[in-house]
Image: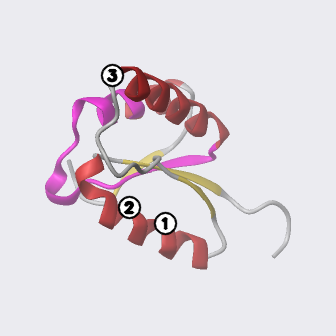
Amino acid sequence: MIGRPEIVCICGSARFMTQMREANRELTFAGVIVVAPSEADESPTPEQKAVLDALHLRKIDLADRVLVVNPGGYVGESTRREIDYARAAGKPVSLTEPG
């Protein structure tokens, strides 16, 4: 591997955690550094969700590009906000399915 590996931030709805894990695994084996949403066993409190949302925007800041995992073309409100944030920061955004 020459130089720094690409860094990709995965975004998507928590309902697609299985698919995001699959994307993480595929990218990692392709030599990519992956930053992904945090996982929790239970739903976060509103305060915890605010912390997680802000933290995920910082993960986007670290990334070279963003991959949105969106089975069936679904993009929720939080993911849409992350896409808008990434594009405003000049980060390329791709989706696993046309939205």
For the residues labelled 3 and 2, the Cα–Cα distance comes to 23 Å
In the image, what residue occupies the spot 62% across and 34% down? 61
Instruction: Look at label 3 and name its amino acid.
Output: Pro
What residue did someone put label 1 on? 24
- Indicate the quadrant where residue 3 lies: bottom right
In the image, what residue occupies the spot 66% across and 73% down? 31
Instruction: Look at label 2 and name its amino acid.
Output: Met
Q: Where is residue 97 in the image (x, y as percent from the top left)?
A: 25, 59
In the image, what residue occupies the spot 41% across and 66% down? 21
What residue did someone put label 3 on? 46
Q: Position of residue 1 (x, y in %)?
A: 81, 76
Front residue (pair 42, 53)? 42
In the image, what residue occupies the spot 29% across and 40% down? 43
Sort mark 2 into few (<14), some (14-19) or many (20+) by Cα contacts within 10 Å.
many
Q: Residue furthest right?
A: 3
Specify start and end residues of the magenta stretch as a single range.
Answer: 63-82
Sort mark 3 into few (<14), some (14-19) or many (20+) by Cα contacts within 10 Å.
few
Q: Nearer the viewer, mark 3 or mark 1?
A: 3
90 sits to left or right of 22:
right
For the residues labelled 3 and 1, the Cα–Cα distance comes to 26 Å
Q: Which of marks 3 and 2 is nearer the N terminus?
A: 2
Taking the magenta stretch, the answer to whether it contains residue 28 is: no
